[in-house]
Image: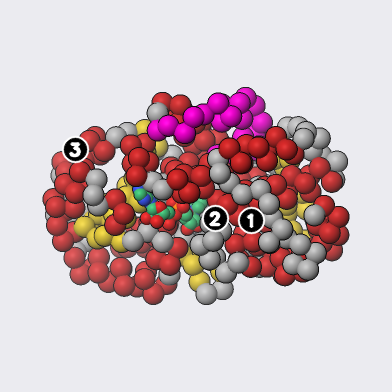
Amino acid sequence: MIINKKIHNVEISNLEKVNKLLLKKDLDANILIIDQNLKSNKYIKKLISKFGPRCLLIKGHEKIKSLDNYCTYIEKILKIGVQRKSKLISIGGGTIGDFAGFLASSLLRGIDHYMIPSSLLAMVDSSIGGKTGLNSKYGKNLVGSFYLPEKVMICPELLNTLPNRELSCGFAEIIKYSLIKPNNFKKRLLKYDFKINSDLVSIIKYSIKTKINYVDDFKEKSSHRSSRAILNFGHSIGHAIENSNLYKSNIKHGEAIALGMLIELKISEYLGYYNKPIDQTMNLLKKFNLPTSYENYLSNDKIKKLMQKMKYDKKVSDNYINIICIDNKGGFIKKLSFEKLEKILTKII
Ligand SMILES: NC(=O)c1ccc[n+]([C@@H]2O[C@H](COP(=O)([O-])OP(=O)(O)OC[C@H]3O[C@@H](n4cnc5c(N)ncnc54)[C@H](O)[C@@H]3O)[C@@H](O)[C@H]2O)c1
Ligand SMILES: [Zn+2]
């Protein structure tokens, strides 16, 4: 399961550089997968035309991460022709990255994956750490592999066309980094003025560094404060919200995580770990146009349904769940029985 490629090769780049690199050699061996929503960008247009039939355009969406779609694309790529030296290059959001990563990890038992994330969420989160994934009818990301991309090239200019709501979803994960590892990063977020500028690039760089610190050693099983599990802050409740909402687009992942973080902060406060005003975090979420009211998903009559959904979480063992709590040093793992969690939820909402 743990593979010996441990180096995170991430660089801040630009599309001109990426084009030069991709068009330099092996055009007849490499495969390019691009999110259709990017096709009007002049650099992307050039790549599409130069790669010709070796370029596959896919509309980035959660639905592409299916087993059926995987079979379709594996056969398509094998038909186009692939060799051990081939690279699979993907340019797109987190869905394209997760899907292409799994294709790369399984084609000919693994070919190199070059990843160019195009959404903010993909730049600061899904392109880092080497998790690939497909969804099953039993749940999200239940099929996948750990497969680090050979190279991740971040081109912030791609964010110029990203819809605002998607930008906000990326900020939900960035706000998560500011809570699990408190320092003056939060202040930088409060000052940020929504421009695609050097401030945003430095926010992206800091976020990537933070994530790399948690994923460095595939520390998933450790219970230490640097464990990969800390990155799940906001996600136990957030995933249950997404799941009970049937993954409909009225609430996107980042939005569900924003609500999940608020609720998990309230749990931390209730247990006596968190003693800062929760309003501060609420205001930060509001600044980035993220939701802060959870009545539609968590009310007394909905707690049981939400608890049921949490039981399918990958972080559940027996009758216990690991919730990430926050104290003045940041995130840590708190094991709670479902019974206790249900009682707490009833008290805090
Ligand atoms: N592997 C991991 O560690 C990891 C971590 C977090 C999330 N994820 C996965 O990431 C996925 C979510 O990623 P996402 O939010 O990027 O979703 P996404 O790929 O669906 O992209 C969101 C939307 O933005 C569009 N888009 C992307 N870049 C654009 C651009 N530059 N200009 C215009 N439109 C653009 C896409 O076409 C899509 O409509 C989920 O499947 C989640 O499970 C994986
Ligand atoms: Zn997330």
Is the distance from the Cβ of mark 2 to the nearest ligand 2 atom less than 8 Å? yes
Q: Which residue is mark 3?
A: 20
Q: Is residue 265 left or right of residue 59?
A: right
Badge 2 or badge 1: first in the primary sequence: 1
The disc label shown at residue 238, or none: 1
Residue 328 at x, y percent in the picture: 76, 32
Task: Magenta stretch: give its range.
Answer: 174-196
Residue 49 appears anywhere in the view: yes
Residue 251 percent coordinates (x, y)? 56, 58
Q: Earlier in the sequence, mark 1 or mark 3?
A: 3
Magenta run includes residue 179: yes
The residue at label 1 has a CB less than 8 Å from ligand 2: yes
Give the residue at mark 2.
253
> Measuring 68% from the left and 61% from the top, which residue is drawn there?
296
Instruction: Tell me the amino acid under the disc marked 2.
Output: His
Are the residues at dot 2 and dot 1 in contact (C-beta closer than 8 Å)? yes
Residue 161's image quarter? top left
